[in-house]
Amino acid sequence: MELVFLLVVFLVFLLLYIGGVPLAWMAIITVFIAFLYIALRYPRGKADWKEGARGSLYLLFTLFVLLLMVYLVVTASSVIDYPDAITTTGWVLGAGFGAMFLASIALPHGLLKK
């Protein structure tokens, strides 16, 4: 249940963000959709809901952290001006070869020396 719930709310949040909806309205609409999903999934309310208070709070905070991370990553990527792919590839390859060189000096016989 948690995975489907998180996917539904994540997709709603993502569609609202792509649509350019302000953050306050995104939060209100996402919470409304989350409650709507729970209401449709568990029509009798507390009688059908198997989670306790701790499980419900865990689900709520998991959803909050997921949506906050998505919002922050997308907002940061729209503000930061990244270098082009060739420059990034060069830096990553240089760092990788440097790390392999240092590892070969520090571990001349490899990791699985017996």
Image (tube, rainbow, N blue to C red):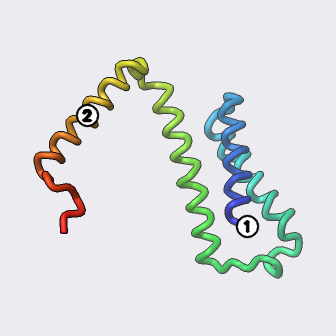
Mark on residue 1? 1
Quarter-wise, where is residue 80 in the image? top left
| Number of the front mark, 2 or 1 | 2
In this rendered view, identify the residue nearer to me: 63 or 83.
83
The kind of residue on which mark 1 rests is Met
Tell me if label 2 and label 1 are in contact, CB under 8 Å: no
Which residue appears at 11% of the width and 46% of the height? 105
Please, is residue 81 above or below residue 48 in the view?
above
- Upstream in sequence: badge 2 or badge 1: 1
Residue at 15 percent of width and 55 percent of height: 109
Q: Is residue 72 left or right of residue 103?
A: right
Locate residue 76, reporting x and y percent.
46, 32
Q: Badge 1, how many Cα within 10 Å: few under 14, some, many 20+? A: few
Picture layout, residue 26 above or below residue 4? above
Mark 2, other Cα within 10 Å: few <14 / some 14–19 / many ≥20: few
Q: Residue at x 62, y 66 (%)?
A: 59
Q: From the viewer's perspective, is residue 65 above or below residue 100? A: below
Q: What label does residue 19 carry, if any?
A: none
Image position, residue 104 (x, y; %): 16, 46
Is 60 left, or right, of 114 in this rendering? right
Q: Quadrant of the C terminus?
A: bottom left
Asked which secondary structure carries label 2, the reply is helix
How far apart in space, not on screen, are marks 2 and 1 (Cα)? 42 Å
Q: Nearer the viewer, residue 64 or 7?
A: 7
Residue 70, percent across and down? 55, 43
Residue type (three-letter) at the residue carrying disc 2: Ala
Left or right position of 82 against 71: left
Say which quarter of the image contains residue 83.
top left
Left or right: residue 82 compared with residue 27: left
Tag 2 residue: 95
Q: Secondary structure at mark 1?
A: loop
